[in-house]
Amino acid sequence: MPVGKMPARKEGRTGPDATETGVIEATIEAVLPRAMYRVRSSAGRLMRVGVDAASSGTIVKLIVGDRVAIRTAARDPSRGQIVRKL
């Protein structure tokens, strides 16, 4: 690489974590320690999720029975992040 020239910056994330599955609806079944929640997806699957960093300031309080939209992790479908409260 020539001196003084930086490689082109890639937009967004790259690598195996870059691909994300779709957003699905779920219901909170349990509030876990450290801002984690156990939810049941609309398909009936149990998942452990946390609040997305971008949404952490906007979501005030989540309790058992709340409906939420979650984004599942690409590597582990039993984990995900809460995107918004429905």
Image (cartoon, rainbow, N blue to C red):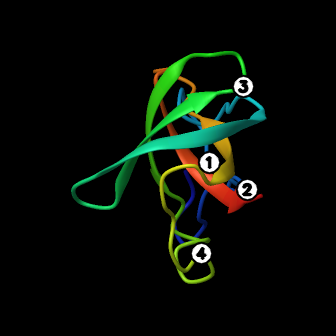
Judge depth for marks 4 and 2 and give the one in front.
4
The residue sitting at 48% across, 61% down in the picture is 63
**Where is mark 2, residue-wise?**
11
Depth check: 8 or 74 in front? 74
Q: Is residue 72 above or below residue 32?
A: above
Classify 10 Å Cα crowding around label 3: few (below 14), some (14-19), many (20 and above): few
Q: Is residue 36 left or right of residue 79?
A: left
Which circle's residue, 2 or 3, is located before the other in the chain? 2
Mark 2 residue element = loop
- What residue type is disc 1 on? Arg
**Where is mark 3, residue-wise?**
42
Quadrant containing the C terminus is bottom right
Task: Find residue 39 and report its horizontal and vertical position in percent.
Answer: 50, 36
Whether residues under marks 4 and 1 lie with C-beta atoms below 8 angstroms apart, the answer is no
Classify 10 Å Cα crowding around label 1: few (below 14), some (14-19), many (20 and above): few
Question: Would residue 27 be seen by someone viewing this image from the given angle?
Answer: yes
Disc 4 and disc 2: Cα gap in Å? 28 Å
Whether residues under marks 1 and 2 lie with C-beta atoms below 8 angstroms apart, the answer is no
The residue sitting at 61% across, 41% down in the picture is 27
Classify 10 Å Cα crowding around label 2: few (below 14), some (14-19), many (20 and above): few
- What residue type is disc 3 on? Ser
The mark found on residue 13 in the picture is 1
Disc 3 and disc 1: Cα gap in Å? 28 Å
Figure label count: 4
Disc 1 and disc 2: Cα gap in Å? 7 Å
